Amino acid sequence: MDEKLKLYGFNNLTKALSFNIYDVCYAKTPREQKDYIDYIDEQYNSERLTNILTTLTDMIGAKVLNIARQDYDPQGASVTILIAEGSMMPVGETQLAHLDKSHVTVHTYPEYHPETCLATFRVDIDVATCGEITPLSTLDYLIQSFDSDIITMDYRVRGFTRDLNGRKLFMDHKVNSIQDYIQEDLLRRYDAVDINVYDANLFHTKMMLKEIDLQNYLFKTDVYELPPKTRLEIMNNLRREMIEIFSGRNIY
């Protein structure tokens, strides 16, 4: 797999990365919860998300064909970018078509718990590429572009392509684990679990931040304003929320 593959025609493999992060915050009053949602909407509006995705597109060596973006009322934003690998024929101001059936999308989902005063911000990013390029090399950038408390990632290679002898190739690069594409110093900050189905070219990794600094989770509140018992209660609620999101089920 290290040498460039000699293929018959175009590389028809589709490489799809689904990247999801969750950021958890404590906002003690309804007003603070609303302010947190407004803050998230401002920090991660469609313009900033577009900048993140166009940088990602540059990183994988693809070309932007078309951008559609939308901010929602009362909250959230979405961006969709059509991309293509390699050069394209020159066109006018409006891009009318794309060749590679490749795209990058992002959607945001702010929400808050009605009783524990915990607010959660979720970001879903999907990158689908056809041809030689793979989105796995962008994981460090994506993790560091958001406050990532919990991360879930799915990577799948679909379809097949052919070599010069007509033999089907269902994978054109070696993948053992998504974790192999994350910097070691970044990975050490998280507990990580893999669920991989190698025969189906399906790879899943989920990660949860190991250390919690309470101040980083308080919105418009200083940790020293809170009595020790309240700090402990908030810490327990934060950890329980993160464990349930990481596990994908209600536990407590």
Image: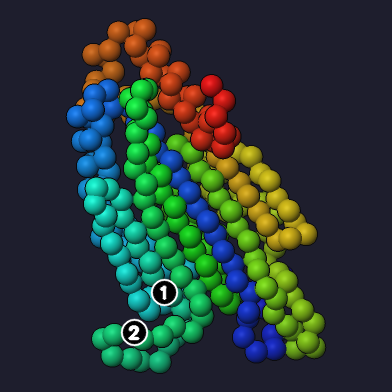
* Residue 165 position (above or below residue 28): below
Residue at the image point whose x is 75% and y is 88% from the top: 164
Q: In the image, residue 60 lies at what x, y percent?
A: 48, 68
For numbered disc 2, what is the local secondary structure? loop
According to the picture, the residue beneath numbered tag 1 turns out to be 82
Dot 2: within a 10 Å radius of its alpha carbon, few (fewer than 14), some, or many (20 or more) residues? few
Q: In the image, residue 80 lies at what x, y percent?
A: 38, 66
Q: Is residue 192 among the parts visible in the rendering?
A: yes
Residue at the image point whose x is 39% and y is 34% from the top: 24
User: Disc 1 marks which amino acid?
Assistant: Leu
Q: Is residue 11 left or right of residue 234?
A: right
Q: In the image, residue 101 lies at what x, y percent?
A: 51, 77
Residue at the image point whose x is 66% and y is 54% from the top: 203
Q: Nearer the viewer, residue 62 or 99?
A: 99
Q: Is residue 15 left or right of residue 101?
A: right
Q: Is residue 55 among the parts visible in the rendering?
A: no
Res. 129 mark:
none
Q: How many marks?
A: 2
Q: Are marks 1 and 2 in contact (CB under 8 Å)?
A: yes
Residue at the image point whose x is 63% and y is 81% from the top: 11
Residue 58 falls in image quadrant = bottom left
* Residue 212 position (above or below residue 151): above
Residue 237 falls in image quadrant = top left
User: Disc 2 marks which amino acid?
Assistant: Gln
Q: Is residue 168 left or right of residue 107?
A: right
Dot 1: within a 10 Å radius of its alpha carbon, few (fewer than 14), some, or many (20 or more) residues? many
For numbered disc 1, what is the local secondary structure? strand
Say which quadrant the N terminus sits in: bottom right
According to the picture, the residue beneath numbered tag 2 turns out to be 95
Labels 1 and 2: the sequence-earlier one = 1
* Residue 186 position (above or below residue 54): above
